[in-house]
Amino acid sequence: MTDAINKSLRESKAARWGALAVVSFTMLTGYYINYVISPLKPLLEREFLWTSSDFGIWNSAYGWFNVFFLMLIFGGLILDKMGVRFTGIGASITMVIGTIFQYIAIEQVFPMEGLIFGIKAQVAIGAFGFAVFGVGVEVAGITVSKVIVKWFKGKELALAMGLEMATARMGTALALALPIPMATAWFGTKQLPALSTPVMFGLALLVAGFVAFIWYTFMDRKLEKSEGITDEVNEEDEFKVSDIVFILKNKGFWLVALLCVLFYSGVFPFLYFATDLMINKYSVNPDFAGSIPSLLPFGTIILTPLFGSIYDRKGKGATIMLIGSVLLLVVHIFFSIPSLNHYFVAIALIILLGITFSLVPSAMWPSVPKIIPEKQLGTAYALIFWVQNWGLMGVPLLIGWALDYSNPEVLLAKANGTTIPPYDYTLPMMIFAVTGFLAIIVALMLKAEDKKKGYGLELPNMEK
């Protein structure tokens, strides 16, 4: 047994870090498409007469199929049954297909008049594409999580997960900073923006990410061969559908899932509206407004691996998640104060949110293998992501509605063709603050449950 372990490819630092780099790039390409529409909100409203509710519908579509058709849960079952190679390739193809529909909608490849199920045709087609993409990127996320556990369990697990998240968020940073320059200064004019150009660029990135994952499958085969595994699913450890009951009865699992949905609901939907917030509240030039939110992912590139390394070596995972939840509440409270409207304040809060966004994920995802056995990890991650998708689906809808509800003068100006006043973002930011408050409560409960059950969330990940 010892000889087999010593000969495992995962013992090679170059091999395991190389595998991490390849799958991290695939996730980077997905994260770019996840946010590519976000900075374009003002241009979409100007060119296509969208409302904030239309924008909210598009972004809420991310979770439609994952939540209502249980696609994420099926993805987790497929992952545990078929393995990372089959599931990862399928997820990559799904991301590409979904993005093609989004491009068709923004480019208006064919006339898109009237309504589809009560939604503007253009919005409905693009939202459908985003929903398909959402299935692909979420299944890719759980697949990559299992890939990392496969290569790094007992080693630098939290650091590896932190580096993967940091790399992926480079895609988020690019998506927040590049689309407006690409749509205006680079490929069009301010009078006639090429709004589909950033989406087309993302489609090309996704194809590159797909090729990268195909490359990874060869590395994965070599890993299994080095460990004497002839099939991706070991019959002794093969996942049984009945094991879902074990996961759902685990209180620790539910606390992690609730913390996940609350924390990410206070960050991801915020990023959808962040560029518009910079323009409307902080009077930032639209050409550069996306640059401020893009600071958030760049900060996580350094901090997420740092906090992950601390968790690997020193432990304190539950404490790290609690601190991050407190900071989330503080950031959104300050964002909601109307008088704090200088762009320096916005920059400071975005940087602080970046620290927050580094703390919780760096400890949360590496904690799941301490609560759930490895053979059930794919389905456990899928169930957590499924719960998370309720927030990613519902909160953008809620924020879009809150913007229109609290700014009736904006809708009236659009209807009359007069000058459109800036949005007041006070109510939406108060809603985001609530997610931080609830996250603190859940983080405290998780810390208490860890002390009671002995999951080891406060213990280091690395084996002595």
Image (cartoon, rainbow, N blue to C red):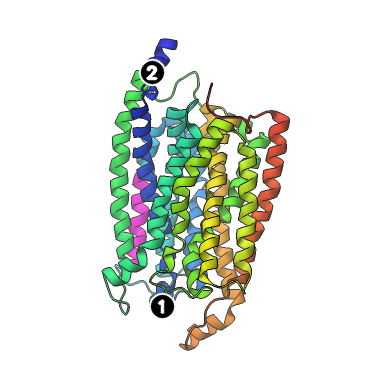
CA neighbours of label 2 inside 10 A, class few (<14), some (14 to 19), many (20+): some
Residue at horizontal 60%, vertical 71%?
A: 340
Q: Is residue 325 magenta?
A: no
Three-letter amino acid code of the residue under disc 2: Glu
- Please provide percent x and percent y for residue 104: 32, 63
Principal secondary structure, stretch drawn in magenta: helix
Q: Identify residue for label 1.
A: 46
Q: Nearer the viewer, residue 365 or 258?
A: 365
CA neighbours of label 1 inside 10 A, class few (<14), some (14 to 19), many (20+): few
Three-letter amino acid code of the residue under disc 1: Arg
Q: Tell me the SS state at disc 2.
A: loop
Q: Is residue 93 magenta?
A: yes
Start and end of the magenta stretch? 92-106
Q: Choose the circle earlier in sequence order: 2 or 1.
A: 1
Q: Nearer the viewer, residue 17 or 19?
A: 17
Q: Is residue 273 above or below residue 144?
A: below
Q: Identify residue for label 2.
A: 227
Q: Is residue 140 left or right of residue 332?
A: left
Q: Splitting the image into 4 quarters, where does residue 430 fall?
A: bottom right
- Please provide percent x and percent y for residue 74: 49, 40
Residue at horizontal 28%, vertical 47%?
A: 208
